[in-house]
Image (cartoon, rainbow, N blue to C red):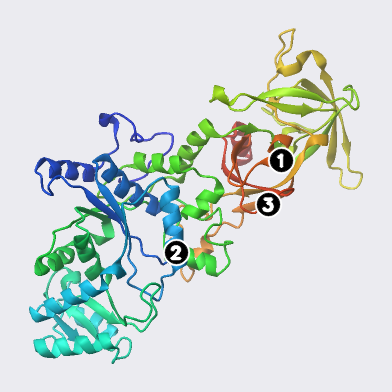
Amino acid sequence: MNGKMSASNPQTAAPGAPAEARPSNFIRDIILDDLKTNKHAGRVQTRFPPEPNGYLHIGHAKAICLDFGLADEFGGHTNLRFDDTNPSKEETEYVDSIMEDVKWLGFHWDGLFYASDYFEQLYEWAVQLIKAGKAYVCDLSADEIREYRGTLTKPGKDSPYRNRAVEENLGLFERMKAGEFPDGSRTLRAKIDMASPNLNMRDPVMYRILHASHHRTGDKWCIYPMYDYAHGQSDSIERVTHSMCTLEFEDHRPLYNWFIQQLGIFPSQQIEFDRLNLTHTLLSKRKLLQLVQEGHVSGWDDPRMPTLCGIRRRGYTPEAIRNFCGAIGVSKTNGSIELAMLEHFVREDLNKRAPRAMAVLRPLKVVIDNYPEGQVEELEAVNNPEDPAAGMRKVPFSRVLYIEQDDFREDPPKQYHRLSPGREVRLRAGYFITCTGVVKDERTGEVVEVRCTYDPATRSGNAPDGRKVKATIHWVSAAHAVDAEVGIYDNLFTKEDPSQTDEGKDFTSNLNPNSLEVLSHCKLEPSLASAAVGGRYQFERLGYFCVDLDSVPGKLVFNRTVALKDTWAKIEKGQRGKG
């Protein structure tokens, strides 16, 4: 997709839409053509091949939905294969997290494999290429290899070791495998064309020496295949028919095909698509690791992180992620998607499934002077207006309540319709109340208590005389309130493109200092006392919230998943702008 797509004007339809309303997906068209021509005997085999060197993020979700979704659509199969060819950066922790994330998204692999499963076969194929005069052992250093490779406008030059005899190459490669040489001293390179306009074809490195313990094979190997060599052959071993990867690998496809052709093995085909880019978000595992290591976030699962474990902790649903990925389409042009579009799909999904509750995040005490002291009523509130089967719940009402501080203004500006002196408002599922006065802190002058009266005839929010009020606000009975801590999360970065920085600074200079606000004195209705970790709720008028992993009995912790649209906040912001 080229450019940006906003939530308010989606150009494509989510999964389940009629075929003519589906988002663009040229890969689906390729598969349809292959099935028509019986190219792979009617088979569709895909794979999702992450490197276990970090946690998956929302960008990987697009690839997962594509790999698994297209295979499912055409009755095919999908393998989960770990590209574990770089032992210095890979850990079992990441393997476990990736499997958990794929399952959380709602997908199940047909085969679980590792590139390390194929180390022996890859080695034998490398020997085959050496014997065919298509590979050689090179003694150039990494810097020298780069120098000899040339540039986009200047052809490369042959390595002085390019024409070693086959027997010498076989002997050196065997000694590399036996561990006789130090790291970086030798490589195995494919012999292709040092004058090729495609730099990837200028005798690429196939194997490097790396004396590092592997998370699965231990110290069995001290030479490891490069991604460009291992990837296509691993696809071929698994007889993958459609190997999908992002556009940065488009220039690598000729090399992918070259290895397969030279070895005469199953002809997997690589297809490239646009990667997911989100505004105000970085999707680089290296940079996300830096955020974790430098303590800018609490960990990989910090709710501000775009990792799947982070957005899961924040309260995003797998259904929302799948719908979002289905709606953005697949193209051959990289673009940027508005973060607001992702939030739209999260909000849309949670609106259907999240039970409602009342919570006051910044409490202000309200005393209803004419309400009988000691009396408690049970009012009925709808659990979810989008789901009639969700039923009703009882909410206690008493003389002393809490409301949001923002729902009261002693000196209200224009267009402010909530509670203020002399003004009547509706309490959600409750009564009409009218402000009669305030109590202030003698030292600061701050309003600490609002005095009101109520109209007993307006129970459930309806006045028998038909009078109307302009605002309905939420509340919690003070005597029954449950204490909680709530994290209010905002964008992690202030810039739309966080990678754009001032000279001499790195991307961390764009971090939003206000990306997290912790509210520690929140008051919740008592039905939330037993809320389980991971439970998702709509706090009425405030947004969608999720019970955090740090919650324990007696100490609830919630994360705000996404806010509701706040009409007054927009008006107030506009007024400040004019001033």
Q: Give the residue drawn at x 65%, y 54%.
A: 550
**Disc 3 secondary structure class:** strand
Q: Secondary structure at mark 2?
A: helix
Hey, what amino acid is under mark 1? Ala
264 shown above or below 539:
below
Does any portion of residue 484 appear in the rendered image?
yes
381 vs 253, left or right, is right
229 or 561: nearer the eye? 229
Image position of 101 (left or right of 537): left
Depth order, front residue of 246/397: 397
Indicate which disc residue 300 carries: none
What residue did someone put label 2 on?
94
Q: Residue at x 36, y 64 (%)?
A: 51
The 10 Å Cα crowd at callout 3, few under 14, some 14 to 19, many 20 or more, is few
Q: Nearer the viewer, mark 3 or mark 2?
A: 2
Circle 1 — which element?
helix
Q: Categorize mark 2 by other alpha carbons within 10 Å: few (<14), some (14-19), many (20+).
A: some
> Which residue position holds label 1?
529
First reached walking from the N terminus: tag 1 or tag 2: 2
Q: Amino acid at mark 3?
A: Val
Quarter of the image containing the C terminus?
Answer: top right
**At 28% across and 89% down in the image, what residue appears?**
185
Estimate the x, y position of residue 387 in percent, counting from the top left.
Answer: 54, 25
Mark 3 in CB contact with mark 1 (< 8 angstroms): no
Work out which residue is located at the far top of the displayed protein and give it: 465
Pick the residue in front: 422 or 277: 277
Query: How far apart are the alpha carbons under marks 1 and 2?
Result: 34 Å
Q: Position of residue 179 (x, y in %)?
A: 30, 89
Q: Which mark is residue 518?
A: 3
Q: Are marks 1 and 2 in contact (CB under 8 Å)?
A: no
Name which residue lies at 74% across and 36% down. 526
